[in-house]
Image: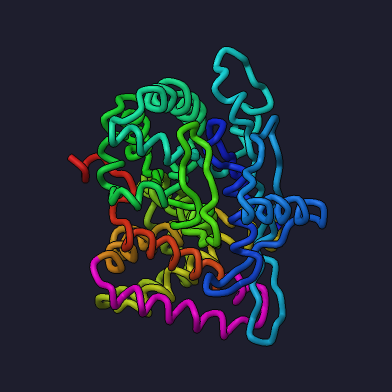
Amino acid sequence: MKSYKILTLGASGAGKTVFLASMFRSLLTQGEYGFYLKAEDFKSQRLLNNIYEKLIIGEWPLGTREISEWKFTCCIQNPDLENFPICQFIYFDYAGGQLTEMNKKDDKLQEIIKQADAILGLLDGQKIQALINNSNEQKIDDFLNKDLPPIMKWMSYCQTPIQFVISKWDLLENDNFDLKEISDRLLDIPKFKELVVSRNKEGSPVRLIPVSSIGSGFATPQPDGSMKKIAGSIPRPFHMEVPVSCVIPDLLEKEIQVNLKRLTTISDASIAENSGFNKLLNKFFKGVLSFRPLIDLVVNIIVEYFLIPIIFNDSEPNELNIIIAQEILKRIDNWGLAGIRRRVAADEKKLAEFQQIKNEYIMEIKDKTTALRSAITSFLYISNKLNQDFPDSEIIVDKLK
């Protein structure tokens, strides 16, 4: 089973441990998301549940002191209550206190970065609130000079997709900030913009994802920076499913875009030798695809050509199959995934149709392949819903100029 390694970076107090506990609790059952997460063992499950249960009564956990490793199996349950494991997500939670000590060489962290499939940088929403309001010089200085530089430094060492996750979104939401305002302010930081521009050129997505591990109306910030629970409140986590759902779609989009140059070096003759390729072209490119056939085609290509050999056979896909898949996706609405995203972002009815497709795929699960197809559809739906709800969640510098 394929494991996707996700490195979580964030300064002390940004809420990494709370985020992981809330994510696990939110995805403990399948619910509306179309998948659920199972902890590696009972010890991990109990620890995460304990963190969350203390959170409910207003006790926030202490910061991480070293690199913690959390393994989750992503599973899907069909209407007959059969469970299908799809893949594994491994989160590495790096100690926030050590992160800001940039003078120390951390060989272990560098090794994890080399293996990472995605890097998640957790940005403290309370400090971003101060930055936008220009209201607390100490918080602003900590964010600009201590918290953000090491995150960007470590991100610059890798070529994998990156996510900037804004924690404590409930605080920013209460001040009526929108994501574009925050994105524009972050792009005013030269090193941040430099990192985004380099990723844009590589065709690797850069996400800006708002999350709240406790949700609006649960706690209020105190003068010392701590949070105090509001009496009688209950947690309403927001967007806990989004960061993990974006990992595979972003990896696939990067794979498609980065390898477009490689396609130009492949001779037409070598592609034409595969009759299946020509049949697909004849079937799908005579006219403009409507939305449902587009989703079906893209999901099936992703599953059949990209993921089945890796996830179920633990081997790399056949090179010619990858070429075929990339060539087809290249011809579908400018790389397929981007085409779907544009259609959904432009039309709320498309998102509702996408949700219906997702639900139908769950009903059709009968084996590992159909379960994988359902999972990919759920991931694509959630990432597309993010783009519609927050159009500025994907940071593209040219678009923002």
Residue at image location 70% in from the left, 60% down from the top: 313
Residue 279 visible at all: no
Q: Residues in magenta?
A: 346-373
Residue 34 point in image, percent of width and height:
55, 72
Q: Is residue 350 magenta?
A: yes
Nearest to the observer: residue 110 or residue 228: 228
Nearest to the observer: residue 317 or residue 336: 336
Residue at image location 68% in from the left, 27% down from the top: 108
Residue 326 point in image, percent of width and height:
42, 57
**76 lies above or below 198:** below
Q: Can you say which quadrant of the picture contains the C terminus?
A: top left
Q: Is residue 278 magenta?
A: no
Residue 345 visible at all: yes
Tell which residue pokes out farthest to the right in this image: 42
**349 lies above or below 128:** below
* Left or right of 38 in this view: 141: left
**344 lies above or below 192:** below
Name the magenta segment's main secondary structure. helix
Residue at image location 30% in from the left, 27% down from the top: 189
Residue 344 point in image, percent of width and height:
31, 68
Residue at image location 34% in from the left, 52% down from the top: 174
Q: Quadrant of residue 200?
A: top left
* Left or right of 394 in this view: 101: right
Number of marks in picture: 0
Nearest to the observer: residue 16 or residue 363: 16
Q: Quadrant of residue 201?
A: top left
Residue 320 point in image, percent of width and height:
51, 57
